[in-house]
Amino acid sequence: MKTRVKLWLAGILAGLEILWFPARVLAEEPVREPDSLYALSAVLMDGDSGRVLFEKNGEEQRPMASTTKIMTCILVLESGKQEETARTSAYAASMPEVHMGAKEGESYKVRDLLYGLMLESYNDAAVILAEHVGGSTPAFAEMMNEKAGEIGCENTWFITPNGLDAREETREGVKTHSTTAEDLARILRYCIQDSPAREEFLEITRTASYTFYDTAGTKTIACTNHNAFLGMMEGALTGKTGFTADAGYCYAGALQKDGKTLIVALLGCGWPNNKSYKWSDTRKLMEYGLENYTWQSFAQAECPQLPQYLQVENGQTEILGSAARTAAALEELSQAEGMLLRKDEKMEIVPRIQEKLEAPVEKGEKAGEILYQVNGETWKTRRVYAAETVEKINFSWCLEETLKRLAFTS
């Protein structure tokens, strides 16, 4: 009987182990990153924080074709010349397909040309705009590179306003018209998040179709938006396609859904006849971001005990209040500040406060900082500073203190 009971209990335990084991495996199973992407270089970026959530050769410099026109568009919009009229030069009229067939001497409204630029990707429209805003295409390219530097693009070089393959001799050597997937995502993020012209940019790039005329009213240009992503996923926000022989198919697009802003950038995503590869990669990366990342506020991160006071050496006061300033620094991180995190990622607050200060100490003097980190990488820094001034000990102060103590004891 005892043997049967033992066997029966063993069977139950074995059964429980079988039931529990798959659950344990599922709970501990790591997040699977996207694989089998067609693109030679790809990036998925958190559009709010600018943090790269996934990358495949994300810092590899490659030609970017007509995704170049994202930068051309935002520079023209920020120039404030949308209501001006731009004239077609002989050089602009010589641009290869895709073009709107502008003839030398024809004039167009700048705002109209922006629709031709972003919806149909007209190469001649890009040159007309560049020459009008910059004075020449080389001068406009300088503006593009300057803006790229301001945005934080360290591996991008613009030569043309339309993205046609190009090389040029510079002081640093021969450079190619190129960017990286990370820089391209960063440029699009600037256009939809930080640029003062972001609303106009979104209005143009989201337009399904647009018709305009030359200023003489003799030529009609009908444009259709070729960004298929806009109708592919709920929350699709904007994007721009591109293709050249050197670059292959390229794409940069953004999506807003469930409180998340996701940006995808693809370079070298197939060559003819693989035009649809960019849409497959874009969907895969966007779905990965939507399914595996949730927004978390820095205010929710674990914070160790912060010092209430700071010791001051050789000061007229031995301890200096810092709690108010430390608390204020923490409060600056409102619930609106945070980023997308994967379930296996950790956000933490790391205080680096000086153990003591040397008098004299000025009010507002830096006493340390609070680092807000994700997986050990710092994303936000808040300064902790002295709440009051502490003078250094001197003869007059010592004399005054001595007299006070004598008066107290007498």
Image: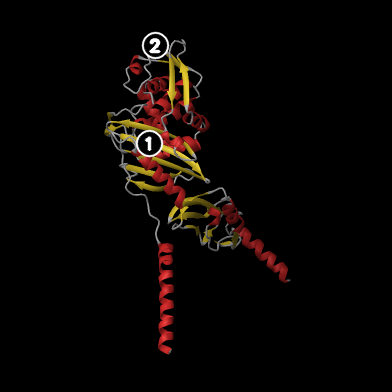
Where residue 153 sits: x, y (%)? 39, 39
Q: Residue furthest right?
A: 410
| Dots 1, 2 in contact, CB < 8 A | no
The quadrant of the image that shows the N terminus is bottom left
Name which of mark 1 and mark 2 comes first in the sequence.
Answer: 2
Amino acid identity at mark 2: Gly
Where residue 384 sits: x, y (%)? 54, 54
Instruction: For mark 2, give the secondary structure.
Output: loop
Q: Is residue 250 above or below residue 49?
A: above
Q: How many marks?
A: 2
What's the residue at 53%, 46% (across, down)? 259
Nearer to me, 318 or 16: 16
Q: Is residue 406 above or below residue 179?
A: below
Residue 182 seen from this side? no
Q: Which residue is mark 2?
A: 105
Report how far apart the C-alphas of labels 1 and 2 lie in the structure: 33 Å
Amino acid identity at mark 1: Tyr
Q: Which mark is residue 251?
A: 1
Crowdedness near tag 2: few (<14), some (14–19) or many (≥20) residues, C-alpha within 10 Å: few
Nearer to me, 299 or 4: 4
Nearer to me, 222 or 143: 222
Q: Does residue 398 appear left or right of residue 236 in this picture?
A: right
Q: Is residue 197 above or below residue 219?
A: below
Residue 376 seen from this side? yes
Instruction: For mark 1, give the secondary structure.
Output: strand
Q: Does residue 390 appear left or right of residue 183 in this picture?
A: right
